[in-house]
Structures are given as structure tokens and as C-alpha cells.
Amino acid sequence: MSLKKSITKKIIFKIIKERFINEVPFLQLLGVRVSKFDYPDVALELKWKNDLVGNVIQQSLHGGVSAAVLDSIGSLVAVAHFISNEKTLTAEYLKNRISHMGTIDLRTDYLLPGRGSLFTATGRVERAGKRVTVCRMKMFNDKNQCIALGTASYLWSDKNQNDKK
């Protein structure tokens, strides 16, 4: 990869990270932050908040919070993989492709109650095609125990292609 493309991709990763943190209201509400974004190493963190309790007796995270964090890391990993492998790096093309990417399937397996003060989610791409990317995700508590696993599929649609049909 040329130095120019390498620098361009670093700038794109920085922009994606900033937009992910600052422009997704639901993630702001949860308190999710991107702790690592150097593909293939991508991670999200979530600090415990009482507002996120799902089981008041066990004082554990709501399952929907865990699922949302897993879906978020999956989509971020899918976007990072896309950028890392994409040859067309124009702003318009990337905006069009990324803005039309969405979750089409999400499975969450809850392994342990979501207890802890800090939770970390990681993910990896299992398969990436032109239209669908499949990711596997893990969520850990502050004792490094895996509390949830996820598998998700993300659809890439190109608005211009869909308009022609």
C-alpha cells in the first residue's frame, strides 16, 4: 500500500471513530466509547451505570444493553474491515456505502450475568462479501470473564444500485 493510501486510511479511521463516538445518540446515552480502533484491533468500552440495570436483584446489565454493545462493535469492525480492503477511497463513495450499511441479523448468547464496573467488547470479521459481512463479537467484564457472545450479519447496499432497480 502506498504511503498516500496509508495516510488516507488513517484519516478515514479517525473520522469514523469520531463520528461513531459523537454522532450516535444511543451510544452516547449508554456511555459507550471506542477504546481501540486500529483494525483488526477494535474495542468498545462501557462503564457501569445504575441506569443500565436489567436485574435489580443481581445488579447486572440489561440484556438489551449487552446486545446493543455487541451489535455496535460488530458494525464498527465491519466498517473497519471494509475501509481496510476498499480501493475506492473517495469521500462520497465511502459515505454512500457506510451510510447504507445495516444489521440484518443479530444473535446474542448470554453466558454470565453482566456484573462489573467496566465492560469491553471486541469483534472480528468471519466472512466479508460484496453485500454481506458476518462478524463474531465478545463482551467481557472487568475480571476478563466473557459475559456474552454475538454473531451478526451486516448488509451493504449501494443507494445508486438500488435506485436503478
Image: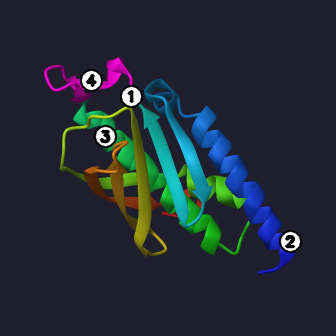
The residue sitting at the front extreme is 143
Q: Residue 136, how many percent across, how many down? A: 35, 63
Q: Quadrant of the N terminus?
A: bottom right
* 97 over 48 or under it: above or below: below
Mark 4 = which residue?
53
The amino acid sitting under disc 2 is Lys
Mark 2 = which residue?
4
Report the residue at 34% width, 18% height from top: 51
Report the residue at 48% width, 29% height from top: 31
* 127 over 120 or under it: above or below: below
- Circle 4 crowding by C-alpha within 10 Å: few under 14, some 14–19, many from 20: some
The amino acid sitting under disc 1 is Trp
The amino acid sitting under disc 4 is Val
- Magenta-highlighted residues: 49-60
**Element at label 2:** helix
Tell me if label 4 and label 2 are in contact, CB under 8 Å: no
**Element at label 1:** loop
Mark 1 = which residue?
48
Q: CA distance from mark 4 to mark 2?
A: 46 Å
